[in-house]
Image (cartoon, helix red, strand yellow):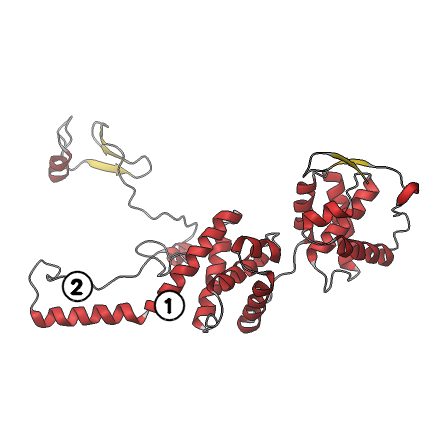
Amino acid sequence: MEMKEFFRERKCPECGAADNIVSDSRSGQWICACCGIVVNELVFDQGPEWRAYDFQEEQDRSRGGSPLSLLQPDYGIKTQIGKSRTDGKGRKLSSTKRLVYNRLSSVDNHTHESEIRNLRIALRELKRLRSQMELPDRTAQMASSYYRRCLKMNLIRGRSIDGMIAASLYLACRKTRIPLTLKDVATNANVSSKELGRCVRTIIQHLQTKPDSGRHEALIHRLGEELRLSMPTRMEAVKITKKTRDNGITVGKNPMSIAAACLYIAGVKTGERRTQQQIARAAKTTPVTIRNRFKEIVRILRMDDIEVKRGAAAVPVFIEDPRTHFNISS
């Protein structure tokens, strides 16, 4: 029996029972309630794609159509007024109504044309950055929300679209606790760090948002992975970081420099030492910054047992450079 005939008669092809065909939405099958034969398989699920665990949640999530997407310029729900010569029933429109619909279509397209064009360029760049930096979808959606608010407040005028969308993504990474620095975003976004920092300050000032402070623990594990340090050394660096936070050393300091200095001290204590040049290269900073943070932490925390000897009196520590794969001596 063909499916058209089955749906027209609602009759079982095996036992001939009428109006006893039931649908099993879990297995996606049409089943005869009398004989149990499977009449049809692979039936489309007509239910929602979300799950609800109580009545209130079901009421909040219930909607019609596809879900909203902040990564689409029109949220994925925009409808356009067509310029067809016929109406919905196929009847030919009169010349007067056709002119009216053409005028409404032009007005609708010009009303949001500049905003949609701006969002189309910005969200295309945002999707590229998300794919290149392997960021989660919720971070990209939060960045899109920041950019849309800037566009509504007319903050994009006079500034580059790439710089503002990169700044929105950086603030979203700070909010979602992703260990990315300003230089990381600037490198992938092809904008200068100075321009990116200026855009970040503009968004913070006008949107009155307060970015979360960088998580030193996440930065430590990121540097430890890049420098091939063991987990005990990383955990020792985390302990030192907590002490520096309790003593107020991290206030006003670059989180990456604090994490790098704590990792350097932990390496000296555990014997798994890396040079200041190696850590500075991985942290994308200078050895002078690492040295200054190192001296400040050792002085305030009174780590008298930390002593780094140099020159002929230094004990040679042979380590492997993870970048060049050559054994060097510090």
Residue 160 rendering spot, x and y as whole percentages: 48, 66
Q: Name the residue at the right extreme.
A: 313
Q: Which residue is located at x 85 percent, y 56 percent?
A: 301
Which image quadrant is residue 24 in? top left
Residues at marks 1 and 2, CA–CA distance in whole angstroms: 22 Å
Residue 123 placement, left or right of 19: right
* Residue 130: assigned label: none
Res. 318 in view: yes
Q: Which residue is located at x 79 percent, y 38 percent?
A: 272
Q: Which image quarter is the N terminus in?
A: top left
Badge 2 marks a residue whose secondary structure is: loop
Residue 30 rendering spot, x and y as whole percentages: 23, 35
46 up-or-down from 204: above or below? above
Front position in the image: 55 or 326: 326
Residue 50 rendering spot, x and y as whole percentages: 39, 49
Q: Which residue is located at x 83 percent, y 43 percent?
A: 269
For label 1, the crowd category at 10 Å Cα-Cα, with few meaning under 14, some 14 to 19 and many 20 or more, is: some
Q: Which residue is mark 1?
A: 115
Please name the amino acid that badge 2 sits on.
Lys
* Contact, mark 1 vs mark 2 (Cβ under 8 Å): no
Q: Which residue is located at x 19 percent, y 72 percent?
A: 103
Q: Which residue is mark 2?
A: 83
Which one is earlier in the sequence, the residue at label 1 or at label 2? Answer: 2
Res. 176 in view: no
Residue 300 placement, left or right of 220: right
For label 2, the crowd category at 10 Å Cα-Cα, with few meaning under 14, some 14 to 19 and many 20 or more, is: some
Q: Which image quarter is the C terminus in?
A: top right
Residue 25 placement, left or right of 147: left
Please name the amino acid that badge 1 sits on.
Glu
